[in-house]
Image (spheres, rainbow, N blue to C red):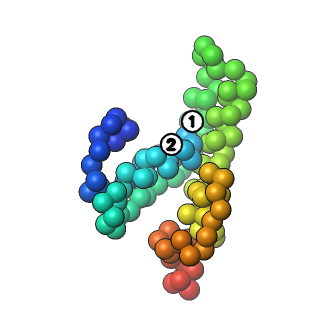
Amino acid sequence: MQRYGMGIDKADVRYVLHYSVAKSIEGYYQEAGRAGRDGQPSQCTIFYNRRDVSKIRGIINMPKKGNTMKTRGVHMEKLERMMEYCEERASCRRQFLVSYFGQTFNRKDCKKTCDNCRRVIAH
């Protein structure tokens, strides 16, 4: 259930847990951005499972009014990009998001806070 997508503005959220994969990077980014709005350390975790992706694909492909092949294709592409984000094990997640939204990534902006960057530091 998405409580904070309903106009609730709470600055001191420390943890955002996604118990399933988001349907798109845009949705994930909006939800993950709820953590740490007050500038304090926070954490966002996704519990990712490919079975969840299969369920979402089924929902996208369900026949419903206004759900054209083109619309389904757009939703599938967004889901595929979200899967890429979840399955990425080497590159900086911040870089992935910045690039996804068409912006230029500056290495100086990487605070080494994502799991992939921390893993590189640990080795």
Name the mark nearer the viewer: 2 or 1: 2
Q: Position of residue 116 (x, y in %)?
A: 56, 71
Residue at 67% x, 28% y is 72
Q: Position of residue 87 (x, y in %)?
A: 61, 58
Name the residue rendered at 61%, 70% in the picture. Answer: 106
Name the residue furthest bottom. Answer: 123
Residue drawn at the location 43% of the way across and 58% of the way down: 45
- Please say if 101 is above or below 64: below
Q: Give, as a three-letter code, the residue at label 1.
A: Ile
Instruction: Give how far apart the Cα atoms at labels 2 and 1 are.
Output: 14 Å
In the rendered image, which residue does mark 2 sit on? 27
Quadrant in the picture for the C terminus: bottom right
Which dot marks residue 86?
Answer: none
Of residue 90 and residue 108, the one placed in the foreground of this image is 108
How packed mark 1 is, by other alpha carbons closer than 10 Å (few <14, some 14-19, many 20 or more), is some
Question: Tag 2: residue type?
Answer: Gly
Residue 85 x/y as whole percent: 60, 56
Q: Is residue 73 in view?
A: yes
Image quadrant assignment for residue 107: bottom right
Q: Quadrant of the N terminus?
A: top left
In the image, residue 8 sits, relative to residue 89, either above or below, namely above
Instruction: Assign a secondary structure to mark 2.
Output: helix
Q: Quadrant of residue 35?
A: bottom left
Label count reads 2
Query: Is there any visible trace of residue 22 in the rendered image?
Result: no
| In the depicted structure, whether residue 54 falls above or below residue 32 | above
Give the residue drawn at x 30%, y 60%: 38
Residue linked to disc 1 = 56
Estimate how packed mark 2 is, as few (under 14), some (14 to 19) or many (20 or more) residues with alpha carbons within 10 Å: some
- Residue at the farthest top position: 65
- Whichever of labels 2 and 1 marks the residue nearer the N terminus, that label is 2
